Image (cartoon, rainbow, N blue to C red):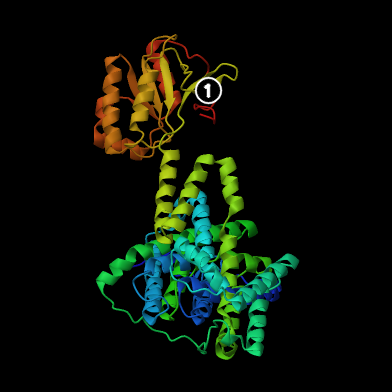
């Protein structure tokens, strides 16, 4: 029988991004949704150029996926639809598996969305929301900068009206330079006009929908002047709602396994980028936010994408900023945008046939350029030079090798950076503070005895194979301390030791034996019950001997003084423990 607490734990939360409804702010949310529709519709159509699917699929990412996240997600601000980063990852990963733009290509894109949804649901069951914390801001900045450089280079051909011959940005830009004499000046003029409208509108006010104005204007001019005969246009765009169903692919395990690394890379990008965006806006507006609930929302959004014949979706920092800038404070804004797109799909797809392809190239080019975070890279360079090179290597890998390889490298570099920072702690010695009649921490380079013949060594991390050598080296170095009464007891302050692995256990046994041979007793204070159990299991307790584990440093000092008859160098801290800094 399921208990009440278990039922609450497994209850599927709904409408967390909407409830409670602020009645006074409904109008503001709806206006923000209209603004998002005006700005994101041309943007999502542009993303279809990155991923290589029909332009209508961009609108599909707003219709069902955005609506589903609004219902199942927890963030009141995150806008989920097409995103340039995941679009670039998919386009690079699928290269060579199907003809870009074909029905098979689109089916593979939809299958990837379904696989990403499965990974999201599995991560939710396993409560893996914390994984978003392991893609550092440094490598994420480098990754997104690399994606921006890659996409912007690939779109230069579209700005010039030249054919796309490669998905490798360096090869494509070389081809563009060699073919510069074949530039289509109708396409170039259109691109420059679109860039001028968008940039000019943003300069006046960021709320001006420059992209939408450019799209409507370009359609009108193209239709009036018959530009279809002089440059590439979208052609007939189907109207109506998407057909729901599974992608028409060969549902075989070999195909699933082949796509699995790409789906995992997309999962990491979605999880990290969405969580970072949700966290930032939840902190800004002091709202609640649950990464695990958001994973359900992101999973449902990608499930909707896969079943409605479109591509993978992600939490978009750009669109989220649009909503916040427009005054939106709940997912009512995103639902409004979905309704607007529904009306466009039913009644307004006809004019899109006259839209020049150069317009979408210009829009995507601007989006990509904005992803190149020069300011962020410069800040990293100034404040953390070593991390800057990590970010730069990540960005270069994305541009030169590929987006998929870039995200894998970003994950590896993030973990290596974490290990580099955490495995060797800054350990100290707890010594007497005669002025305050308490305790203080001092550097290992200038150790002091807390009582004649007694040193307290504070270790700041769990003990495992990577830092076991550091522990042994520092402890044995303390045992050689000269200029003070001979060391008879060395106490390890172990409150920070949350775990001991097999290698560290062997080191502890050996270290205890070496110290005993020098006439020094090794004891531990503030050891947790869990680690005490590990000491028993590894045989460390037996090697240490009886009464070698104490509940506090105060207890160690008190017993040591009673046995040796030596007074402490200074009175212990009031309350029986070290000063807070210890």
Q: In the drawing, does residue 104 fall left or right of residue 382?
A: left
Residue under the point 38% across and 39% down: 498
Q: Name the spot of residue 62 as percent of width and height, x first.
A: 53, 77
Front in this rendered view, residue 36 or 365: 365
Residue under the point 56% across and 90% down: 346
Eyeballing the image, is 264 above or below 342?
above
Q: Name the spot of residue 69 as percent of width and height, x first.
A: 51, 72
Q: Which residue is mark 1?
A: 439
Q: Secondary structure at mark 1?
A: strand
Q: Residue furthest right?
A: 204
Q: Name the spot of residue 367 as percent of width and height, x first.
A: 58, 66
Q: Is residue 6 visible?
A: no
Q: In the drawing, does residue 355 fall left or right of residue 462?
A: right
Eyeballing the image, is 417 above or below 146?
above
Residue under the point 29% across and 23% down: 512
Q: Image quadrant of residue 523?
A: top left
Q: Image quadrant of residue 277?
A: bottom right
> Crowdedness of circle 1 by 10 Å Cα count: few (<14), some, many (20+)?
many
Front in this rendered view, residue 201 or 318: 201
């Amino acid at each position: 029988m399921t208990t009440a607490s278990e039922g609450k734990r497994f209850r599927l939360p709904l409408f967390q991004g909407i409830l409670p409804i602020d009645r006074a702010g409904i109008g503001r949310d709806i206006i923000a949704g209209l603004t998002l529709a005006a700005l994101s519709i041309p943007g999502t159509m542009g993303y279809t150029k990155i991923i290589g699917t029909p332009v209508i699929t961009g609108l599909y990412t707003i219709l069902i996926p955005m609506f589903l996240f609004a219902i199942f997600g927890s963030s009141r601000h995150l806008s989920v639809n097409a995103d340039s980063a995941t679009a670039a990852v998919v386009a690079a990963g699928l290269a060579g598996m199907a003809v870009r733009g074909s029905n098979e290509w689109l089916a593979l894109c939809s299958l990837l969305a379904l696989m990403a949804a499965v990974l999201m649901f599995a991560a939710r069951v396993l409560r893996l929301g914390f994984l978003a914390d392991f893609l550092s801001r440094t490598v994420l900045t480098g990754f997104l900068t690399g994606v921006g450089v890659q996409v912007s280079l690939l779109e230069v051909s579209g700005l010039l009206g030249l054919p796309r011959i490669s998905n490798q940005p360096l090869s494509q830009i070389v081809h563009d330079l060699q073919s510069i004499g074949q530039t289509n000046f109708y396409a170039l003029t259109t691109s420059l006009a679109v860039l001028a409208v968008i940039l000019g509108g943003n300069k006046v006010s960021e709320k001006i929908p420059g992209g939408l104005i450019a799209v409507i204007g370009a359609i009108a001019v193209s239709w009036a002047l018959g530009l279809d005969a002089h440059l590439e246009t979208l052609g007939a765009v189907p109207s109506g709602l998407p057909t729901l169903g599974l992608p028409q692919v060969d549902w075989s395990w070999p195909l699933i396994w082949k796509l699995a690394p790409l789906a995992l890379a997309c999962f990491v990008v979605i999880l990290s980028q969405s969580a970072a965006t949700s966290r930032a806006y939840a902190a800004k507006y002091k709202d609640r936010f649950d990464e695990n609930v958001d994973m359900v929302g992101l999973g449902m959004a990608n499930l909707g994408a896969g079943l409605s014949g479109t591509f993978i979706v992600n939490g978009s920092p750009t669109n989220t900023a649009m909503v916040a800038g427009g005054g939106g404070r709940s997912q009512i804004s995103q639902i409004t945008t979905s309704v607007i797109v529904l009306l466009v799909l039913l009644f307004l797809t006809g004019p899109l046939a006259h839209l020049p392809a150069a317009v979408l190239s210009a829009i995507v080019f601007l989006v990509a350029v904005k992803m190149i975070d020069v300011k962020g890279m410069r800040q990293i360079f100034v404040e953390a030079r070593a991390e800057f090179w990590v970010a730069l290597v990540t960005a270069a890998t994305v541009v030169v090798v590929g987006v998929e390889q870039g995200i894998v490298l970003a994950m590896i570099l993030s973990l290596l950076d974490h290990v580099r920072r955490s495995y060797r702690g800054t350990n100290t010695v707890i010594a007497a503070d005669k002025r305050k009649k308490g305790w203080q921490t001092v550097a290992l380079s200038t150790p002091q005895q807390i009582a004649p013949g007694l040193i307290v060594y504070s270790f700041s991390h769990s003990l495992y194979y990577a830092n076991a050598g550091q522990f042994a080296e520092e402890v044995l170095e303390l045992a050689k301390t000269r200029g003070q009464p001979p060391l008879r007891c060395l106490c390890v302050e172990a409150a920070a030791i949350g775990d001991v692995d097999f290698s560290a256990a062997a080191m502890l046994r050996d270290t205890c034996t070496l110290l005993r041979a020098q006439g020094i007793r090794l004891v531990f204070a503030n050891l947790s019950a869990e680690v005490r159990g590990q000491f028993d299991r590894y045989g460390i307790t037996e090697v240490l001997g009886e009464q070698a584990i104490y509940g506090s440093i105060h207890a160690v000092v008190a017993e040591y003084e009673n046995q040796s008859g030596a007074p402490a160098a200074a009175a212990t801290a009031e309350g029986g423990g070290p000063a807070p800094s210890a």
